[in-house]
Amino acid sequence: MTFIDNYPKSAKIAKANFLVAFIALAIGGLFGLIQALHRTGWARNIISSAEYYTMLTGHGVLLALVFTTFFIAGLFVWGVTRSLDREPENMAFSWSWFWIMLIGTLMATVAILGGFVEGSSIRAAVLYTFYPPMQAHPLFYIGAALLIIGSWMAGADWFRSYLAWRKEHPDERIPLQTYMTLFTMLMWYVCTVGVALEVVVLLIPWSLGWVNQIDPLLPRTLFWYFGHAVVYFWLLPAYFVWYSILPKLSGGRLFSDSMARIVFIIFLILSTPVGYHHQYADPGITVGFKFYAMATTLLLLLPSLLTLFTVVASMEHGAKQRGGKGYFAWLGKLPWGEPAFAGCALAGIMFAAGGFSGIINAAMNINILVHNTIWVPGHFHLTVGTAVALTFMAISYWLVPQLTGRKLKNKTLALIQPYLWFLGMTLMSNAMHRGGLAGIPRRTAEPNYSQFDFEAVFGTISEIKWQIAIGGILLTVSLVFFLWVIFNSWFRGERADKPVDDFIPAALSGPEHAPKILDNIKLWVLLAIALVLIAYSVPLAEMVMDGLFSPGAPTIPV
Amino acid sequence: MHIHRFERFWIGVSLVAIAIFIATVVIGFSVYDLRVIGAEKTVDPQNLQETKFADPGVRKAEPGSEVDYEVYVMSRQFMFNPGTAEPITVPTDAKIRFHITSPDVLHGFEVVGTNLNTMVIPGQVATFTTRFDTPKTYGLLCNEYCGAAHHVMEGRLKVVSKSQFNEKQLVQ
Ligand code: HEM
Ligand SMILES: [Cu+2]
Ligand SMILES: [Cu+2]
């Protein structure tokens, strides 16, 4: 018996979400390769430089917004169902959020892909941050709004399951996986208020032509109100995997259940009031608020450092169960030959590197050196592009068999895949970081100029370019391996009663050691809201007071 | 709650590290004068002809001003004025204040290889002050996506020695 036998309805909806996620990953990944080849000048004839921006919009939206959101939805359906031991309360409701998210995604995707059709008026080359006054087709904004609304309903679905469970278990601690899901979604509710207001109140009326000017700073600020917390919306599900599954895959048990809860609380409280750290270089935001955001951002290092401790301690425990010894020698006893473990562990290592460049980004005045250079994609391909994406891919090798009741096929390819991703990302990302130090901009189809040349601080410009191109190719090959393994296992895998060992042992220090206050949802939500109000009420009030759409810039359709 | 003693130690180390990072920024800010841009005045992006941006370029600062020169730069799809057609020319050893805005979409203003790097947002004026010690010509580029030809938006910033700087070229 595995997940699909115990919870067939949940398995079905989780699989539907994964399917959409993997299709988005396939298309987005292909776009990534073409971008890497185009930017570096290795192949500038696949698309035109004007179309580059349509493609980049597709890459950002399909990977950072669609792949992540759908995968997370599938993962949380699985986690809530198994940890509460109950399927969703009402399947019609569950399928309705799935379809709303999917319809929204299709609308936005059509708007973006329209940019490849010559003469089409349906276009959305506004990138995934869609800063006005550049204007996309209304389909794009309406689609984005539906994706968010669908995700809110998904969260409501998990809260419903929790409340129903609570009635039957009045005195029990919230099971850890459900706890992590609920706290991630609470953070998601707090932060998506910003982007929902932006899209629904400002951008949709404006794109429909009901107003003909827009104040660029206000929607940009609302976007970044959401835009940092969204990275934790991607990251916390990876933490969910690292806390609740990785210890088991390493052969041991979670070190501390209470620490996991504390970490999620800190993320709920601090994720949103840091948004200005994406606006350090913006005129129109006072230095004081930038400073507040910086201090909060650096405090957010704490939960990640705590995670590092707990995850490494759990892995060490696992390795020692497997006969590992010494201070470091136990590392060799970890199951590096298992694709799911290897992928998660490599993702964790890359996340540590991403954390270093993140500290530099967070340091307000140092950030200015790298702001909007290719350094920044170098940073987030380590975080969302690897810590998150590689964890999701790796854990799929363990989840898809449970959801389909079929064994994993092509195990060798599955094992090579995370190592290849790691290698490709090492090349692409280090080169992007160094390119950024030389001043090479991001989001630029042809970063070579007629009036000056770049000078590399470390290495040479041509070596940086070939590392980006080769890295991009290796990443794409790795992605093809992943898709092939999943496709084969899902549709052609051998049926088995127990396709993987899906038992998750209890934590070494379990919830009975965690103070009850950690489960006090209302308290933590109120604290989160208070910190958001401190950060945002004054600046937003100032931006709104001179008129919602003023100082107004004229509309510029893309 | 039970916290392992190694974990306590780790929490302590983490907090100290965080404090050091914050201190680094504060020291950079106060001792080395490494600032970031703040909130200055807003302008009406559809009425820039009534401002100094109508006649952009390098100006002598008003007498009694805390700076020596004021530079007004208009960033628009897909050029800097001045900057693209002719370089922005400024002298060494002088306090120079930049004012940059846009009448259309978002742009970036990056002087390559320096920490002169700001967003340009319609409705806002990006203002920062700097000085150059040695003559040098820098590349200038737009680092925020601003439309289909974003990648051609570039220019130069030319720093000439104080003695060779020709004040006759200034905008009056
Ligand atoms: C095959 C693997 C991948 C390759 C070759 C690749 C390549 C690239 C390149 C070259 C850029 C920079 C484009 C520019 O600034 O001009 C970029 C941007 C980006 N990538 Fe990837 N990428 C890959 C995978 C991913 C994954 C897995 C994610 C996230 C889950 C991701 C998220 C992003 C985002 C959010 C951007 C920024 C888009 C923007 O600036 O609007 N990428 N990618
Ligand atoms: Cu951020
Ligand atoms: Cu531009």
Image: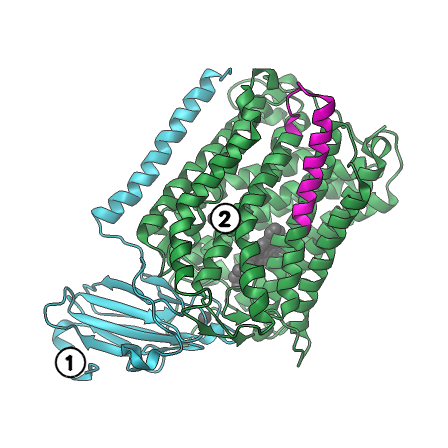
Q: Is residue A161 magenta?
A: yes
Screen quadrant of the C terminus of chain A: bottom right
Is residue A327 placed above or below A398 in the rendered structure? above
Image quadrant in which you'd find residue A500:
top right
User: Is residue A267 something one can see in this rendering?
Assistant: no
- List x then y, in percent, for residue A374: 47, 58
State the extent of the magenta-drawn residues as a range: A150-177
- Rendering colour (chain B): cyan
The residue carrying mark 2 is: A228
Residue at figure coordinates x 75%, y 33% from the top left: A81
Q: How is the image coloured?
A: by chain
Q: Which of the numbered marks, if any, corresponds to residue B167?
A: 1
Question: Subunit of mark 2?
Answer: A
- List x then y, in percent, for residue B8: 43, 20
Mark 1: few/some/many CA within 10 Å (<14, 14-19, 20+)? few
Q: Is residue A350 magenta?
A: no
User: Is residue A318 something one can see in this rendering?
Assistant: yes
Residue at figure coordinates x 74%, y 44% from the top left: A413
- Between A51 and A459, the residue placed more toward the observer is A51
Q: State left or right for residue B106 relative to residue A493.
A: left
Rendering quadrant holding ligand 3: bottom left
Image quadrant in which you'd find residue A217:
bottom left
Which kind of residue does numbered mark 2 sit on? His
Note the chain letter of the green one.
A
Q: State left or right for residue A216 relative to residue A71.
A: left
Question: Subunit of mark 1?
Answer: B
- List x then y, in percent, for residue A204: 59, 65
Mark 2: which secondary structure?
A: loop
- Between B86 and A479, the residue placed more toward the observer is B86
- Between A347 and A267, the residue placed more toward the observer is A267
Residue at figure coordinates x 50%, y 48% from the top left: A228
Mark 2: few/some/many CA within 10 Å (<14, 14-19, 20+)? many
